Amino acid sequence: MNFPLFIAKKIYSDNEDKRKVSKPAIRIATIGVAIGLAVMIVSVAVVLGFKHTIRDKVVGFGSHIQVGNFLTQQTTLEYPIAIDDSVMNMLKKIDGVKHVQRYATKQGILKTDSDFLGVVLKGVAQEFDTTFIHQNMVSGSIPQFSDSANSNNILVSKIMADQLRLKTGQRLFAYFIDDNGVRMRKFNIAGIYETNLTQYDKAICFADLYTTVKLNGWKADQVSGAELTVNDFDKVDDTENILIDRVNRTTDKYNETYSSKTIRDINPQIFSWLDLLDLNVWIILALMVAVAGVTMISGLLIIILERTTMIGVLKALGARNKTIRHTFLWFAVFIIGKGLLLGNIIGIGLILLQRYTGLVKLDPATYYVSTVPAEFNLPLIIALNIATLLICVFVLIGPSYLISHIHPAKSMRYE
């Protein structure tokens, strides 16, 4: 039998004297651990949810890696690159690549009878992954895009639709100005999307790849580039390194040079901002663990002082200091365990409440999301529980040595 554990159970289940000083201390320690863990769980869930939501929105507009013309990626001008079937197949076979799609862009002006708006027309083809846009559709539907015909359909954002007072099914004119003069196209608004990622919603509208290539005056196999989606975002740099070895600095049949960039390279400000959130999480975790540790130390000291007589009796019966320390550490584990249980109930409950009700709202113009995103990550929650338990027990080892200074003869007269 584990003697310290046996005694700790007896002390923890002792409810005979309701006037004990340690009762409020135990409750405060339990509440401190519970609140600390709940705040840590909610903080990690919100930060992870926020980071992944914003990241997925940015990736939705530009994929994980873009392969294009070297000159385009070094300047603000648009240069074409040849992406034919052989190049597409080669890109698809690269380790880690999940999906490849072509795109072409053209700056233009959308005009109605009363207003006009500068936009970037992004042409996509039949291989375009519509999952992201489908999740953010406000009205209408996503047309079948093509690289061989012009359907005259266009997807615009809600910001554009509101500014130009447009609705699904309406027609509008688009004007494109370049060295060849002014060209006009008539489009039908097939659908309206809203991602709340303002810098993209204000600029990007989707049309056929065929239309955009023709507006740019390029050959049929020339596009702005190819967007690659990888299986694991954390390994995007590994896939990028393969592209650097196999694709970058090679030339197409028009002597244009291939180059690639990751989504982090394309949007360094957004990802740097998201990385800063990790620092906030570490600060919150440190503060909450400190709160839980301090309340546990205070509670343990009060319990030791209240049990001074019992400690003296145990020493008189031959119990070693180590045995008695382990007894009170086991007692502390029971308190921490109850606090962890309550903290999990509160923290996970708040996460689920937010996920399924969207109770806490945000300003999408500032935070890019309309509600606080909360991501349920079971391995991280388990890790937080284990870390909190180990750290709290560790910080109690020092205060437990107070027991070695208690003498049996004096403690038996202690009140």
Image (cartoon, grey):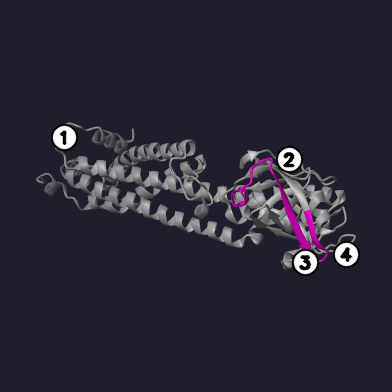
Mark 4: give few (<14), some (14-19) or many (20+) Cα within 10 Å.
few
Q: CA distance from mark 2 to mark 4?
A: 34 Å
Q: Which residue is mark 4?
A: 255
- What's under tag 3, amino acid-wise? Leu
Q: CA distance from mark 1 to mark 2?
A: 72 Å
Circle 2 crowding by C-alpha within 10 Å: few under 14, some 14–19, many from 20: some
Amino acid found under the numbered disc labelled 4: Asn
Q: Does the residue at mark 3 contact the one at mark 2 (Cβ under 8 Å)?
A: no
- Measure the C-alpha gap from mark 3 to mark 2: 32 Å
- Location of mark 1 (residue): 18
Point out the tag, 4 or 1, that comes first from the N-terminus. Answer: 1
Q: CA distance from mark 3 to mark 1?
A: 79 Å
User: For residue 123, which numbered disc appears in the image?
Assistant: none
- Give the SS element for disc 2: loop
Question: Amino acid type of disc 1?
Answer: Lys
Mark 3 to mark 4 CA distance (whole Å)? 12 Å
Element at label 1 = loop
Q: Are marks 3 and 1 in contact (CB under 8 Å)?
A: no
